Image: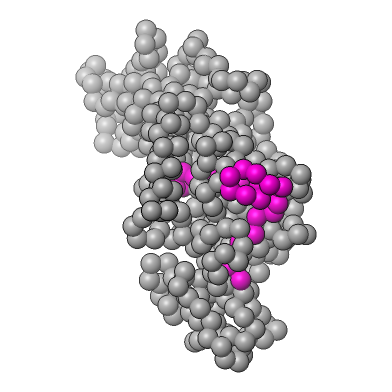
Amino acid sequence: MKQFITTSALLLVSLVGLAQLSPQITSWIINTNSAVGSCTACASQTITSVPANIQTVQYSATQVYVSATGVPSYNIGLWTANPNQPANQNLVCKFTRAAVQNTSTAIYCPNGSIGLWSNGVAIFNPKDGQYWNNSTGAFANGVTTTGYNRNALVYEGVSFDNCLGHPQQQGTYHNHVNPTCLYNSANTAVHSPIIGYAFDGFPIYGAYAYTNTNGTGAIKRMTPSFVLAPSTGTVLLGANSASAAATPTTPTTRNAGPPVNTSYPLGNMLEDYVYVAGSGDLDFHNGRFCITPEYPSGTYAYFVTIDATGYPVYPFVLGPTYYGTVQAGNTGPGGGHNTITEPTTVYTPTSTATGISEITNKAIMCIIWPNPVEDVTSIYMDVNSKNNVKGSLYNTKGQLIQTFDNLQPSISYPLDMSNYSSGIYMLVLESGNEVIKQKILKVK
C-alpha cells in the first residue's frame, strides 16, 4: 500500500505540473547576457568564444527541451594529468514533464552523461570508465560480474579543477561529484537549490535539505545509505547491488580482485560500497520523496552527497540506478542530441519571480554554413529566432525537394546536399505571416 501511495502521489504532482510552469522549465541558468566560456587551461580548442550555460529552454505539454553548449560561465581548468580540452557539445536534452517511478527492470546509470546540471554541464556517474587490472569486465544489467569499477574520485580526482570538473576525450566537460562552482555548497543554513535534473526527469538538489521528508525540521546535510564493507568482511563482486552483503571473513582480498592493502584500500573500487537501508537519509538511488521549496506538494529528488568538510561521498550524485524511467535520446551513442518534432513554447525568464514574459515580436533568424556547400551544410537557427519555424528547400527548377518542421532556436540542423547537382537552391522559412528566403549555392 505504501508503494502505491508514493507512485500515485508522484503521478498527481506530475499531472498538476503540466498545467503550469514547473521547476523543470524555470530552474535552468539561461544565458541572457551573451556570456562565454572562460578557461585557464584551454589551448587549441578554446571555449572563450563559445556561449555559456543554457541557450534555450522550450516546452510542450509533456516535454522540456534544453539546448546547451555544455560550457559553464565560470572559469574552468587547470587539469593535472589530463590532456583533454573542453568543446561545444551542441546539446539538446529532453526531460519528461511527467516523471514517474520505474517499477520495472532497474535502469543503471551508464557511462557518459546521466543528467544535466542547471548550467548545461554534463553529470557523469561515479565510475572512471576503467577496471582494476585493465580487465574489460563483464557486466550484467550494470552490475560487475568479473571486474571491479574504479572510483572516479580516487583515480581521476587529481585531474579535477577547482570546480571539481574536467573534460573527457570528446571535449565533454563534466562533474562526477558535487559541482562546487555552480552553487554555494557551504551554505548550511538554507535548503539547497535545484542544481540539475537527471534524465529520468527528477530534480537534483545540493547537499542540504529539511530533516524531515514532510518539509519540517532543521536544515541538515543529506547522507547516503552506502557504507564501506565492514572491516571484518571480504568484499563481494556486485556489492553495490541492493541485495548484496559482506561475508564475515578476514578483509585481505576481494573476490577475483585486488588485495585490500595500502595500494588498493577499501573505497578505491565502487564494489567496495554496500547499500544498508536506513543507514542514511537517502535510498539506493541516492534520493528520497520529500517536500522541497520548489515542490511544496512533494517530489522524488536526488541530492549530491558530501561529508562535513565538503569532500564528496559515494555515490556522489545518483545511485547505481535511476529512480524513474529514462527516455531514449539522452544517453548512449549520440545521446543528448534530440530532434524536436513537436510545436513548443520558448521559456523566457524575467527579472521578477512571477510568471514569464513571452516575446511575441521575434523574427526568423538563421545562418547557413558553409555556403557555398559541397556536401553537407547546416541550418543554424539563432538563439533569438522564432520557434516552430517551417522550412522548404526548392531546387534550381523551383521544385520542392525537402521540408523541415518545427525548426527551433539555438539548434543546428544538418542539410545533406551531396546528391544534388550544382546550382542555386532556395530555402524558404515560414512562421505565421513572416517568410524569409535564403539562397544556398551548391558546388561540385
Q: Main secondary structure of the magenta part?
A: loop
Span highlighted in magenta in the image: 199-227
Q: Quadrant of the C terminus?
A: top left
Task: From this view, report whether residue 222 is shown above or below residue 90.
Answer: below
> Residue 96 placed where, x, y %?
41, 39
Q: Residue at x 51, y 58 (%)?
A: 285
> Residue 271 placed where, x, y %?
53, 74
Residue 24 colored in magenta in the image: no
Q: Quadrant of residue 61?
A: top left
Residue 101 appears in the picture as rendered: yes
Residue 224 colored in magenta in the image: yes
Q: Quadrant of residue 258?
A: bottom right
Front-most of 372 and 344?
Answer: 344
Task: From this view, report whether residue 261 is shown above or below residue 208.
Answer: below
Front-most of 165 and 221?
Answer: 221
Q: Residue at x 42, y 67 (%)?
A: 142
Front-most of 66 and 200?
Answer: 200
* Number of numbered discs: 0
- On the picture, is 121 further left or further right than 438? right
